[in-house]
Image: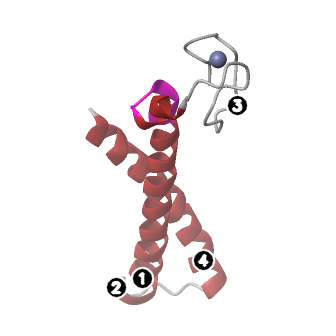
Amino acid sequence: MQCPVCNHLNSATDVRCFQCRTTLIQEAVGHSDSYRKTTGALDARMYSGVGAFFGFFLVAALLKFILPGVNLGDGEIYTISAVGAGIGGLIGRALLRARMK
Ligand SMILES: [Zn+2]
């Protein structure tokens, strides 16, 4: 984080400026760009994680219990469910992007 007083470049976690001891923490409390970027990345990870989780179990449950006449081995169901997890992750990210608008 750049010090607003002396422009010394401090690390993002520093509470005080290394050079002039100016308190930097109020910069972090406000929604600075780096703060928003960090929470945005966390949100994206959470949404895609939840999406992948539901995608996986939705596809697995669909193949195993709901669709009649589907006779796949557990390995095949697992593989297809992993694809479902990937799609679920993408849907989660798309939902997040739609919500941020
Ligand atoms: Zn400083």
CA gap, disc 4 and disc 3: 44 Å
Is 34 located above or below residue 38 in the figure? above
- Residue at figure coordinates x 35%, y 38% from the top left: 97
Say which of marks 1 and 2 sits in front. 1
Element assignment for label 4: helix
- Residue at figure coordinates x 60%, y 36% from the top left: 15
First to last magenta residue range: 30-37
Could you classify mark 1 by the number of other residues whose Cα lies within 10 Å: few (under 14), some (14-19), or many (20 or more)? some
- The residue that disc 4 covers is 78
Q: Amino acid at mark 4?
A: Tyr
Is 39 located above or below residue 47 in the figure? above
CA gap, disc 3 and disc 1: 47 Å
Q: How many marks?
A: 4
Element assignment for label 3: loop
Is 56 located above or below residue 94 in the figure? below
| Outermost residue, right side | 19
Q: Nearer the viewer, residue 68 or 83?
A: 83
Q: Amino acid at mark 2?
A: Ile
x then y, percent, for residue 39: 46, 43
Q: Which mark is residue 76?
A: none
CA gap, disc 4 and disc 1: 11 Å
Is 76 contained in the magenta span?
Answer: no
- The residue that disc 1 covers is 61
- The residue that disc 3 covers is 11
Q: Is residue 95 left or right of residue 90?
A: left
In which quadrant of the rendered image does the N terminus lie? top right
- The answer to which of marks 3 and 1 sits earlier in the sequence is 3
Q: Are marks 2 and 3 in contact (CB under 8 Å)?
A: no
Image quadrant where residue 2 sits: top right
Say which of marks 4 and 3 sits in front. 3
Q: Are marks 1 and 2 in contact (CB under 8 Å)?
A: yes
